[in-house]
Image (cartoon, rainbow, N blue to C red):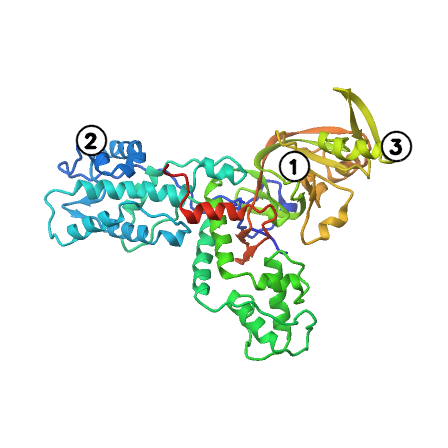
Amino acid sequence: MTSTPKIFLLVCLAGLGLNRYINNEPAISPFMQTSNPVHPSAISVPQEPDLRIDGARFVDFFRRYPLMSDYQENLKSFYAKRRYTYAWFERNHLVEQATIWSNRLLNVEAEGVYKHFPYQKKLDSLLDNVKVKANIKTPDLDLELLLTCSYFEYSKLVWNGMDDAASRSANWLIPRKAITYDQYLDSILKTPANKSYPSGPVYRQYELLRTELEKYRQLESEEWKPIRGAAESARLGDKSEILLKIKARLFKLGDYRADTSNNNFDQSLFLAIQRFQERNGLIANGRLNPQTMAELNVPIKGRIKQIIVNMERSRWLPLQVAGDYIAVNIPEFRMHVYHADSLLWSCNAVVGQTIHPTTQFYGEIKYIMFSPYWNVPPGILKNEVLPAMEKDPNYLASHQMEIADYQGGMPVIRQKPGPTNALGQVKFMFPNSYNIYLHDTPAKSFFSEASRAFSHGCIRISEPAKLAGFLLRNKQEWSPDKIRVAMRSGKEKQVVLSKPVPVFIAYFTAFVDRDNRLNFRKDIYNLDNRLAEMITSGNDHLRK
C-alpha cells in the first residue's frame, strides 16, 4: 500500500539534518497532532456591569438540573474567570452563537456519538422564548447556564470521548490527552456568526473520518446487496455482466471514475481495483480474488461502525507531539517515523498473533542494542524450547542457544548474536512491563505478506538499519557503514540515545491516508465490536 495515515494519529524541516529521510509532503496519520491545536486566549469579558451572575444561584440551578452536576466545577471556574459576566447574552440580547451552538447539539450524531444533551427540549424551549422578545431586560439564567453546561457535555462526548475505564476496556493503554475545555469555549463565543467554528481540540484524523462518516451515511440509503458471481477468473480485456455491478460499486466508493455502462474489464477498472485493494490492505494485483470480493461486499453499516469506532480512538490521542516520534498501527502492519506533524518514512512491520497480541501503549526508545542476544521469554521457554530440548538433545547447539543461568530450578536460555538470531541484528528498546520492543528479524519473507500477525507480541520491522540511522543521525561517529558493521559484528553493543524518542503503538482499523483516501483494515484482535457496542448503546461511562 501507499503511505498511511489513524492513532492510531499530519513543517519545514530544513536545517535539522533529516534530508535523507524526508518526504516533503505533509502527512496525515492516526498518530498526528491536530492541525489546529488550541491556544488558550484571554477570556473576553463584556463591559456591561449589570450583566453579572450571582454565583450563589449555581446551587439552585444544579438542584433543578441534576444531570448537569458533573460540571459544577467547570461552570464555577469558567464564570470566575469572566468575573461572573454572562457569556451568551450581550447588550440585552442573546448572541447569535447561542442558536448556532444549539443546532450543533442537535446534530451530534454527525460526530459519531449516540448520546444527546439531556435537557435538549428544555433548552430549545428557552431559546424559542427568548427569540420572540425584541429586548431582554433580564437575561434568562437557566438558558445561560444550560448553554454553558451543554458545551461541557459536548466537549466530553465529542472531543474527549469515553472515559478512561472505557478506553482501558478496549485495551488502550496510551495516555489520554489532557485539555482545558473552558479556554476553547471563549474562542467559540468570539467566532462571528457568519463563520464556521474553529476546529475542535481533536487532531485532523478525527475530522477526516467525520467527513467520511457523512459520505457513508449517504451510501447507507442506497441499495447495497452482495455481488454474487464468478469474478475471480476475469482479466483485462474480458467481458462479463458482473463487471457492471463491480464498476458501479467501485464508482460509489470513489475508486472508479470512468464509464459504468459497459461490461469491459478495461484499464480503468484494473486501476480502480488496485486502488481499492491498496486502501483495504490487500495485495494490489488488480484481480477480483475472493479477498477483494469479500471487502467489496462488506455492508455499509459495517463500514460506518468501523469509522465511528476509530473516531472514538482518535479522541483519545494526545493533541501534539513535539520533535521525533514513531508510531506503529497494529492492524495496518506498518511503522511510521515522524518529525512533529510530518511523516518522514514508513515500512512494513510484523505484529503479534491473535493469541499473542501486541499491546497498545506508549513508550520511549532509550537505547539500541546491536548484535543482540535473545533472552528466551518464560512462556516460550516453557511451551516451546524445553519440550524441544527433551526431544532433541542437540536442540540448543543447532539453534545457536546457550544456558546463561538458572533461576528457580529453571534454565535461563539465550540465543547468541548472529544472522539467525530471532531478533535479527538490532533491537530498539523502550523499557516497558509488556516486554515489547522493535527489532530486526531473519524471517524477511513475512514482510511481503498482506496480513503480518506472526510474532509473539514484539514488533519486527523491515528497515531496521534505516531506523538505527535515523535515531543516531546526531551522533557523528555512527555513520551508515558503522551501523552495518555493528549489526554484523556478532558482539552485543548498547548505544544510548541522546534523547528518548516517543513510540505510540496503537490500533486503527479505519483511517484517511495522505492521499486523502479512506483506508480500512481487518480487526485482527476483535476489538472493534466491543467498543462499537459501548458507543451505540450510550454506555460511555460518562454518567453512572
**Relative image position of residue 434 (x, y in whole percent):** 62, 32
| Residue where numbered disc 3 is placed | 397
Residue 444's label in the rendered image is: none
| Residue where numbered disc 2 is placed | 55
Is residue 208 or residue 113 the one in the foreground?
113
How far apart are the alpha carbons under marks 2 and 1? 54 Å
Q: Which residue sits at x=29%, y=50%? A: 101
Question: In the displayed image of the protein, which residue is found farthest to the right?
Answer: 394
Q: Is residue 102 above or below residue 236?
A: above
Is residue 101 or residue 128 the one in the foreground?
128
Q: Is residue 484 left or right of residue 130?
A: right
**Relative image position of residue 65 (x, y in whole percent):** 24, 38
Q: Is residue 395 left or right of residue 164?
A: right
Name which residue type carries label 2: Gly
Number of marks in the image?
A: 3
| Residue where numbered disc 1 is placed | 471
Q: Is residue 441 left or right of residue 129?
A: right
Q: Which residue sits at x=23%, y=40%? A: 145
